Image (spheres, grey):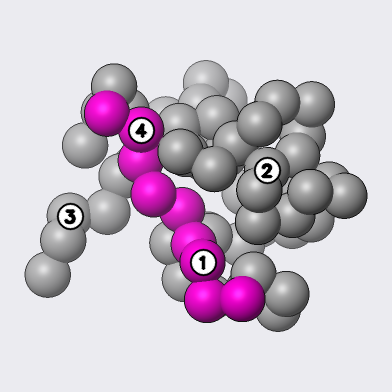
């Protein structure tokens, strides 16, 4: 089982450390805007979320693990 990346509260937003993040609260998974529950950390997008088409958070090479 892979170790899940743990963002530091009040410092890291999970999306920013994701390979799919394109900036401006958008990503290639949610091109119209990342759902607020994911952006605010209410939903950990290391697990499925409606509309993600089976694509969840994947850390960038420089994201801390």
Q: What stretch is highlighted in magenta?
A: 53-61
Which numbered disc, 4 or 2, marks the residue that appears first in the sequence? 2
Magenta stretch: dominant SS?
loop
Marks 3 and 2: CB-CB under 8 Å? no
Which numbered disc, 4 or 1, marks the residue that appears first in the sequence? 1
Camera-nearest label, 1 or 3: 1
Task: Give the left or right position of residue 48, taking residue 38 as reference.
Answer: left
Label 3 crowd bin: few (<14), some (14–19), many (20+), radius 10 Å: few
Tag 2 residue: 27
Q: Place residue 40 in its image quadrant.
A: top right
Q: Nearer the viewer, residue 59 or 65?
A: 59
Assign a secondary structure to mark 4: loop
Tag 4 residue: 60
Q: For the residues marked 2 and 1, what is the alpha-carbon distance in whole angstroms?
A: 11 Å
Farthest left residue?
1
Q: Residue drawn at (17%, 55%), measured in percent from left and top? A: 3
Camera-nearest label, 3 or 4: 4
Q: Is residue 40 visible?
A: no
Q: For the residues marked 4 and 2, what is the alpha-carbon distance in whole angstroms?
A: 13 Å
Tag 3 residue: 3
Which numbered disc, 2 or 1, marks the residue that appears first in the sequence? 2
Tag 1 residue: 55
Assign a secondary structure to mark 2: strand
């Amino acid at each position: 089982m892979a170790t899940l990346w743990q963002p530091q509260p009040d410092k890291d937003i999970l999306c920013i450390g994701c390979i799919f993040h394109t900036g401006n609260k958008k990503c290639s998974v949610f091109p119209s805007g990342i759902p607020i529950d994911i952006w605010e950390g209410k939903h950990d997008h290391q697990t499925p979320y409606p509309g993600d088409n089976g694509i969840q958070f994947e850390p960038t090479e420089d994201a801390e693990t």
